[in-house]
Amino acid sequence: MTSINIECVVKERYRIGESPVWEEKEGVLVYVDITGQKVCRWNPTTNQIQRISLDAPVGSVGLRKGGGYVVAMGTTFCALNWEDKKVTTLARVDEDKPNNRFNDGKVDPKGRFFAGTMSQEIRPAVVERNQGSLYTLYPDHTVLKHFDLVDISNGIDWSLDHKTLYYIDSLSYTVDALDYDVNTGKTSNRRHLYRLEKDEGIPDGMCIDAEGKLWVACYSGGRVIRIDPQTGKRIQTVKLPVDKTTSCCFGGENYSEMYVTSACDGMDEELSKRQPQSGGIYKITGLGVKGIPPNEFAG
């Protein structure tokens, strides 16, 4: 067994760091600061951080086949051109809910971008309930709504055979599974896969590894947990030095490193003193498992 090493690699403090995705061709980690309204790129080789500020909260970011990124911000799906910082609206959702915003999102194996909504937070993790929905943006920019009555739409990923969608609505405290038709992008038969225990916190962002196991970042739990979707059992816990862990992805050489984002919004002075690197990004090595490359939006 190699020993697990955890290091804060991005010391900049983000209000709600989220949606990390490894961009192999640039060799950078792309991520967002939701309430800071920024999309950022960190280059581990040069340690340089680039940022683009946007004019609404940015829930998530995905890679785009034609270059640049697909972004879920405010209640719009947008394309972001990194070179000229141009933002192009692709589609709008939740137009009858002005208090809503997008949250977590991810691109599916066929190049569709999934992202869900929630009401704006009253304070961290406190929201008006049942206001969100889960959506897919298709490459032709049409939008499919899968279901509504979501509290905080969060982590998304797919099984290695693409037949199952894994999904988190944070305030249900569960990781769910849905049957997935990869040809149409439609979901059915939603069911609970794993229920978090009291000390594990709130399930937030999620990713899958090359063995088909799920990694879930636990907000207010200061950890990522590894779940076996076949048995519905937790098989590993990795604790981090900050409580507000928000999401995780694999990246780096051969996708052998895990990156974990965190938040500092809503922390009182005492907790901020105890955890001064809250809002930073952590790298975990020595897990002994690799991730898989992210998908790219085809539109």
Image (cartoon, helix red, strand yellow):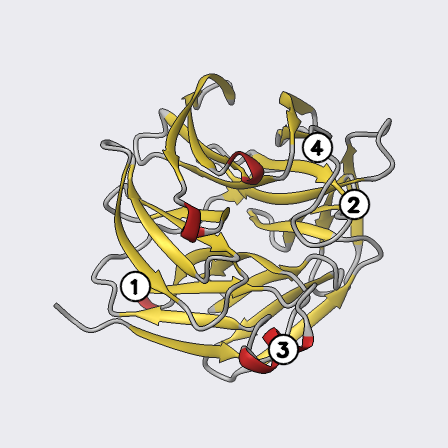
The residue carrying mark 3 is 270
Q: Which mark is residue 139?
A: none
**Amino acid type at image mark 2:** Gly
Judge by depth and name the residue closer to the eye, 293 or 146.
Answer: 146
**Amino acid type at image mark 4:** Arg
Judge by depth and name the residue closer to the eye, 180 or 84.
Answer: 180
Name which of mark 3 and mark 1 comes first in the sequence.
Answer: 1
Q: Secondary structure at mark 4?
A: loop
Name which of mark 1 and mark 4 comes first in the sequence.
Answer: 4
**Is residue 208 toward the left or the right of residue 143 in the image?**
left
Up-down relation of residue 279 to residue 75 (above or below) = below
Where residue 90 sits, quadrant-wise, is top right
Name which of mark 2 and mark 4 comes first in the sequence.
Answer: 2
Q: Secondary structure at mark 2?
A: loop
**Amino acid type at image mark 1:** Ser
Residues under labels 3 and 1: Cα distance?
A: 35 Å
The residue carrying mark 1 is 256
Name which of mark 4 and mark 3 comes first in the sequence.
Answer: 4
Residues under labels 4 and 3: Cα distance?
A: 29 Å
Residue at the spot 66% in from the left edge and 68% down from the top edge: 267
Where residue 193 sits, quadrant-wise, is top left
Q: Residues within 10 Å of mark 1 (few under 14, many from 20)?
A: many
Residues under labels 2 and 4: Cα distance?
A: 18 Å
Up-down relation of residue 188 to residue 30 (above or below) = above
Residue at the spot 67% in from the left edge and 49% down from the top edge: 59
The residue carrying mark 4 is 129
